[in-house]
Amino acid sequence: TFAHENGKLLRILDFDDVKDRLVAIDGRIDAKFWDMVKGNINKLSDISYWVNVVYGDIETPALSSDEKSFLNSALSSLPTDGYNEGTMKIWANAITDATGKKGRDLYHPIRLALTGIEFGPELSALLPLIGKEKIEERLKDLLGNVEVDENRIATEVCILADKATVDEEIIRLNSHINQVRETLKLNEPIGRK
């Protein structure tokens, strides 16, 4: 079809080839934005949708209670700073730790919540452009403005950090090593006393 062939042509164009037309659509479109979305459009005007995803508002589908529960966990697991192309992986790992979900079960509801559609550019490329504030806003809007209890998050982080520490085990190991050394220094048979 014409749309498909046109899309193939757009995918091979560099930003400089379409810069003037893109800037006329929205002045915030730059080379990075173009490279991210050009594989997901069939005509140049389709880029307006992705401008809204990144900078504006989108329509999102209704969610089941399970999806809302999952997205609430995703919101609670949202990284706090340093949004870059590695953020999605960090966020996905945190969500998996919190929910046990992986793969499509993890990425599909997040994509729908953040973009309103089931396909599009890699979330790892989209997250830094959308930004933490807009991601939080979209998730909270979908959840009906459920407030995230920051104290609960801090408590969970402390519990997780405490479980991750191995200080006690190192102290215990050092104690055992010292006992073995002392026993080896003895000039008597080693064994039960």
Image (tube, helix red, strand yellow):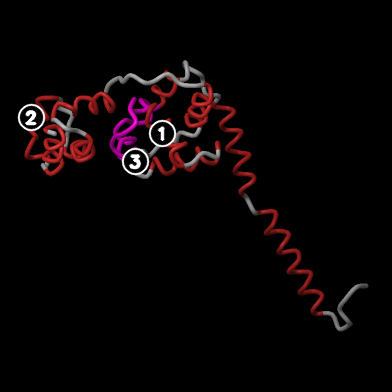
- In the picture as drawn, the residue positioned furthest to the front comes out as 1
Quadrant assignment, res 57: top left
**Residue 2 magenta-highlighted:** no
Residue placed under numbered mark 1 in the picture: 108
Residue placed under numbered mark 3 in the picture: 124
How packed mark 1 is, by other alpha carbons closer than 10 Å (few <14, some 14-19, many 20 or more), is few
Indicate the position of residue 20 as horizontal and vertical percent values. Answer: 6, 31
Image quarter of the C terminus: bottom right
Question: In screen coordinates, is 88 left or right of 5?
Answer: right
- What amino acid is at disc 2? Arg
Q: Which residues are magenta?
A: 114-135
Identify the residue at horizontal 52%, vertical 24% (top origin): 148
In three-dimensional space, the C-alpha distance between marks 1 and 3, rounded to whole angstroms, equals 13 Å
Mark 1 or mark 2, which is nearer to you? 1
Question: In screen coordinates, is 157 left or right of 55?
Answer: right
In three-dimensional space, the C-alpha distance between marks 1 and 2, rounded to whole angstroms, equals 32 Å
Total numbered labels placed on residues in the image: 3
Residue placed under numbered mark 2 in the picture: 21
Q: Foreground residue, 95 or 67?
A: 67
Indicate the position of residue 72 as horizontal and vertical percent values. Answer: 51, 26
Q: Secondary structure at mark 2?
A: helix
Mark 2 and mark 3 lie on one chain; the one further toward the N terminus is 2
Q: Is the Cβ of the residue at disc 2 closer than 8 Å to that at disc 3?
A: no
Q: Is the Cβ of the residue at disc 1 closer than 8 Å to that at disc 3?
A: no
Badge number at residue 74: none
- What amino acid is at disc 1? His
How packed mark 2 is, by other alpha carbons closer than 10 Å (few <14, some 14-19, many 20 or more), is few
Indicate the position of residue 153 as horizontal and vertical percent values. Answer: 56, 31
Q: Foreground residue, 123 or 152?
A: 123
